Amino acid sequence: MVILDLTIPGGLGGKDTIERLLAYDPAIKAIVASGYTEDPLMGRYREPGFMGVMPKPFDVKKLSHVVAEVLQS
């Protein structure tokens, strides 16, 4: 399982990274995290292949809940 940040200034962001990871391993479980909650992908996170979403900032309790949901799916 991986947690990917949606936006990496000057780098490879979460959307491009999940596409590459899924090409390598279609069974990968991924969560997208971002402080840009208005980004349309945060509402449609399953389209590129994410299984969970974490708006920033988040706490350990919320993170644990989302991780557990993704691992059980």
Image (cartoon, rainbow, N blue to C red):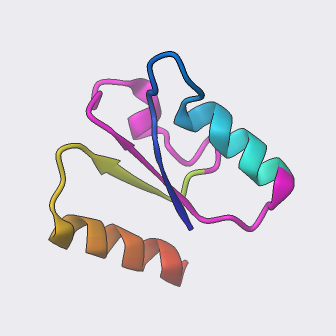
From the image, give the main secondary structure of the stretch colored magenta: loop
Residue extending farthest right:
24
Name above or below for residue 40 compared with residue 64.
above
Residue 23 position (above or below residue 19): below
Compared with residue 10, is residue 23 higher up or lower down, i.e. above or below? below
Q: Residue at x 28, y 74 (%)?
A: 65
Q: Quadrant of residue 30?
A: bottom right
Q: Nearer the viewer, residue 67 or 47?
A: 67
Q: As rendered, which of 72 and 59 lies closer to the eye?
A: 59
Q: Relative to residue 25, is residue 46 drawn left or right?
A: left
Whether residue 37 is situated above or below residue 22 in the rendered picture: above
Magenta stretch: give its range.
Answer: 24-49
Task: Residue 17: give x, y in percent of width and height.
Answer: 65, 39
Give the image location of residue 41, x and y in percent.
47, 32
Q: Identify the residue at horizontal 56%, vertical 48% (top origin).
A: 46
Residue pictured at 65% horizontal, 44% vertical:
18
Residue at point 50% right, 83% down? 72
Q: Position of residue 67 (x, y in %)?
A: 39, 72
Apparent side of residue 38 relative to residue 17 in the rendered image (left or right)? left
